[in-house]
Amino acid sequence: MTYNNPVFFENEFYCLGVHGNLGVCSIQILGVFNPDDMTWRILDKPEPIRSEAHDYGDRFCHLVEFKGDLLAVFRPYDAKPIEVYKLDRSQMSWTEVLRLDDVVLFLDNWNATMKTSLEYGCCNRIYLPVLGYNEAEDHKVSVFYDLEDGKYKPGFYGLTEPINSIWVEPKFYLHM
């Protein structure tokens, strides 16, 4: 059982454990699976990001490959900040990511995907599979976490989560 999908990266499968270790599913053995020769390679590094986390996780954890980089994303079950880390392969260590610049990240409970966006106001955000309500315009809105100010919009509490959700890939256009 895993808490997220493995990522196929440079011809091997990587899994992210609840502690932020790259390993076999959610357990503590650090390794990467190579499907060509059907072997596990044990990794000494990187060190776990969240060694204080409970064994079954105190948040959703995601591993994403984007433009040749591996990113670890930790989304809490409450209004605490979302944490994003990038694997520095030269040092085999995690470095915190404070900005996504021209990228938007979509998370659900088991998957994550990143897209480049030139659409004003969409970048540097993490969209979640939950809905809020815009009282001024009287409709439901998709909730996102803004990395710029570290806040959920609309506010975190009172949100609803659909039983099943999918992400539809948006077509971002640059408004002139």
Image (spheres, rainbow, N blue to C red):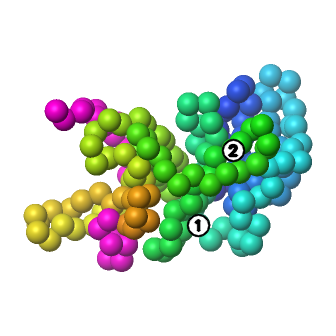
Q: Which sits in the foreground, 124 or 136?
A: 124
Q: Residue at x 29, y 68 (%)?
A: 154
In the image, farthest residue toward the left: 137
Where's residue 131, x and y in %?
Answer: 30, 63
In the image, farthest residue toward the top: 36
Where's residue 11, x and y in %?
Answer: 72, 25
Residue type, numbered disc 1: Arg
Q: Which sits in the foreground, 71 or 121?
A: 121
Check disc 2 and report the residue beneath it.
87
Magenta stretch, residue numbers: 153-176
Q: Is 85 positioned to the left or the right of 75 in the image?
A: right
* Image quarter in which the N terminus is found: bottom right
Q: Is residue 66 visible?
A: yes
**Picture quadrant of residue 83:** bottom right
**Of discs 2 and 1, which sits in the foreground?**
2
In the rendered image, residue 159 lying in the magenta stretch gets the answer yes
Q: Is 85 positioned to the left or the right of 141 in the image?
A: right
Badge 2 element:
strand
* Image quarter in which the C terminus is found: top left
Where's residue 161, x and y in %?
Answer: 37, 64
Check disc 1 and report the residue beneath it.
59
Badge 1 element:
strand
Query: How far apart are the alpha carbons under marks 2 and 1?
Result: 19 Å
Q: Which sits in the foreground, 88 or 111?
A: 88
The local crowd at label 2, few if under 14, some if 14 to 19, many if 20 or more residues have their Cα within 10 Å, is: some
Residue type, numbered disc 2: Leu
Q: Is residue 4 visible?
A: no
